[in-house]
Image (cartoon, rainbow, N blue to C red):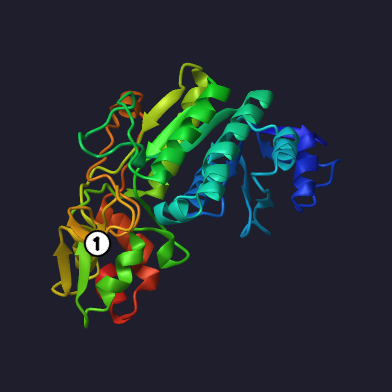
Amino acid sequence: STSRVPGSNEADFHTNLGLQVSQHEDVDIPNRRVLITGATGLLGRAVYKEFNENSWHAVGCGYRRARPKFEQVNLLDSDAVHVIIQDFQPHVIVHCAAERRPDVVESQPDAASQINVSAAGNLAKEAVGVGAFLIYISTDYVFDGTNPPYKENDIPNPLNLYGKTKLEGEKAVLENNEGAAVLRIPILYGEVERLDESAVTIIFDKVQYSNKSANMDHWQQRFPTNVKDVASVCRQLAEKRMLDPSVKGTFHWSGNEQMTKYEMACAIADAFNLPSSHLRPVSGRRRPFPSVQNEPYMITDSPVVGALRPRNAQLDCSRLEMLGIGQRTPFRVGIKESLWPFLVDKRWRQTVFH
């Protein structure tokens, strides 16, 4: 699905990206264009790759880590956002950029609200201006986790500021762009650049250093989801929308293996043939009592000190499944692919993969 474009705006845009395309050459350019925000992040990289490898013309934008592969765009600069969208004229925009760390959101609420809400609302308006289909990435944390599984139309009740800002972002998007889609997803993992890039992969060090015991949360029920699967869902959703304008509104996607952090750690140990006897399940933790200031620490059944988390915010994915959209990588398969570069004892590589 590529078209021959002699000396077009797209060729100009390629030149802007430093690809030095002569305006007088015929250039093979896929005729479907997608813009990905947060393209330097764990999810954004996977989304960029998925569209790029499936004959879309993908442009990614990032901020601190953007260059040279991606465009550097400050999403809080509405003029800069306007320029890239008008220049590139995308058919689809996937908005992956967010402040997704709950404890950072609590400590920097204004900055988090700017990126999670204001930037999203502005992007929604700009998408309308070029007739682009916007996919806004949201979270299972819009729910309080008391009555799973959650359908798209269930009443949200976020427990922490992260969930609140993402829910406000959803509203800003749908109020400014009635044809947009919101895609709620849970805890993500994938091919990380650093272990701390995912709340799943960050536990690998605790798993590997079996000389000291490690307390692992065994309270919060999670559904670890591979970014490659989310990326595939985004592309399938975009392609379905190009044929059917009724594809809009809120959607859920999630892995289907329910695990606590402790169970993830054990599964990771098992996948790499490592011991797990040093891992300790912890079902309740000390945290400040949320409603009273300067109150002493109380023992509660909430898992971590910091932002409150929902116990089980399992997402019902049947709406996408009914559309024939989905992809699920088994956790052991995906986690092995993601973590083997961070294996300390290289002797295991042979046994794990051969």
- Total labels: the figure holds 1
The residue lying toward the viewer, choosing from 138 and 256, is: 138
Query: Which SS class for mark 1?
Result: strand
Query: In x, y percent, where is residue 293?
Result: 33, 53
Number of residues whose C-alpha sits closer than 10 Å to that of mark 1, classed few (under 14), some (14–19) or many (20 or more): few
Q: Amino acid at mark 1?
A: Tyr
Q: Residue shown at 58%/35% (left/top)?
A: 93
Query: In screen coordinates, is 87 left or right of 308?
Result: right
Say which residue appears at 42% left-offset and 45% top-offset. Answer: 162
> Residue 283 at what x, y percent from top left?
15, 58
Q: Which residue reaches farthest left?
A: 277
Question: Is 288 drawn above or below residue 214 in the view shown?
Answer: above
- Can you see residue 236? no
Residue closer to the observer: 223 or 155? 155
Left or right: 350 as drawn, with respect to 228: left
Residue 347, image x and y in percent?
Answer: 29, 81
Query: Does residue 272 sit above or below 38 in this rendering?
Result: below
- 197 sits left or right of 128 in the view: left
As drawn, 96 above or below 340: above
Give how far across and how far down residue 337 sits, in percent: 35, 61
Quadrant occupied by the C terminus: bottom left
Residue 17 located left or right of residue 182: right
Locate the N terminus and report the quarter of the image it occupies.
top right
Residue located beneath label 1 in the image: 297
Given residues 82 and 332, the one toward you in this image is: 82
Res. 171 in view: yes
